[in-house]
Amino acid sequence: MVASVLMQRNGESALEILQPDSRTSHLEPEQRVVFCGISWRRYLAFDKKLGNDRPGPRLYYLDGELELMTTSNEHERIKEWIGGFLEDYLLHLGIDTMPRGQATMRGVLKQAGAEPDKSWCIGEERNFPDLVLEIALTTGGVKKLEIYRRLNVPEVWFWRSGKLEIFALNSVGEYKPMRRSRVLPRLDLRLIERCVAIRSWQAARRSFRAALSKRGSR
C-alpha cells in the first residue's frame, strides 16, 4: 500500500512532497525516515548490511523505532565548525580529550543506539563519551535525549535555530536544560554561536582563536 502511494504520478513522486521543513527557511534540511516495529536484532543486521565505512545514513534506535538520517551540506558545516572550535578551546586550556566523532553508541539492555554528530571523552577514554553534539536543522525523529539518558551520557548539546541548547544529567538521571556547560563550565557558548554564523571557515576559526587569546585562560 505505502509503496504504491509513493510511486511516480504525473511525473512527480510523492516523496518529493514529503521534504522536511527546515527550522530556518534558508537552511538546507536533513532527511529523516522512522521505521516502527524494528527488533534489536534487525537493527543490528541492518547496520551490518550497510557497512562500517558508509557515508550515510546515520542510525538512531529506541524501543523498536529506527531512524535513518542523511545530513545536508549545512548540517555538516555547522558540525565541523563547532567541532573545530571545541578542539581549539580544549587545546588552549590544556584539557586532555579523546574525540569519539560519530562512533556508534549502543546499549542492548537499554534498547537504545545512536551515531551522534560529534562526541568527546574529556580527560580520559571511556565506554561512552562525556559530551555529544547533535545538529538539528529539522524537527522529528526518535527521542535523542532518551537514547542518551539510557546510555548515561552526562551532557548533550543540540544546535537548533542558530543556538546551542545544553542538557545535563542531574542526580536522579534526568536531563535538565542548562545555561552553561557542566563539562566545560568556562566555555563561552555565545562565542561559538557568533562564530558559527561566519560562513568562511578561516575567518570563523581566526575569530574564535582571537577571542580565546584575548580572554586568556579565565
Image: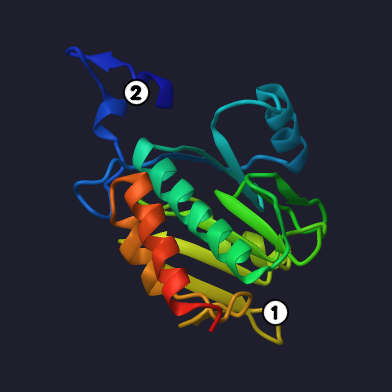
Q: Nearer the viewer, residue 64 or 27?
A: 27
Coloring scheme used? rainbow
Q: Is residue 80 above or below residue 4?
A: below
Q: Point out the residue furthest to the left here.
A: 10
The quarter of the rendered structure image containing the N terminus is top left
Determine the CA span between mark 2 and mark 1.
42 Å
Residue at 50 percent across and 81 percent down: it is: 180
Percent across and percent down for residue 150 are 71, 65
Three-letter amino acid code at the position of disc 2: Leu
Q: Nearer the viewer, residue 89 or 28?
A: 89
Q: Is residue 92 above or below residue 43?
A: below
Percent across and percent down for residue 43 are 70, 37
Q: Point out the residue furthest to the bottom here.
A: 171
Query: Which residue position holds label 2?
Result: 6
Q: Picture quarter containing residue 89?
A: bottom right
Query: Which residue position holds label 1?
Result: 173
Could you tell me if residue 146 is visible in this image?
Answer: no
| Circle 2 Cα neighbour tier, 10 Å, few/some/many (<14 / 14–19 / ≥20) | some
Three-letter amino acid code at the position of disc 1: Gly
Q: Which SS class for mark 1?
A: loop
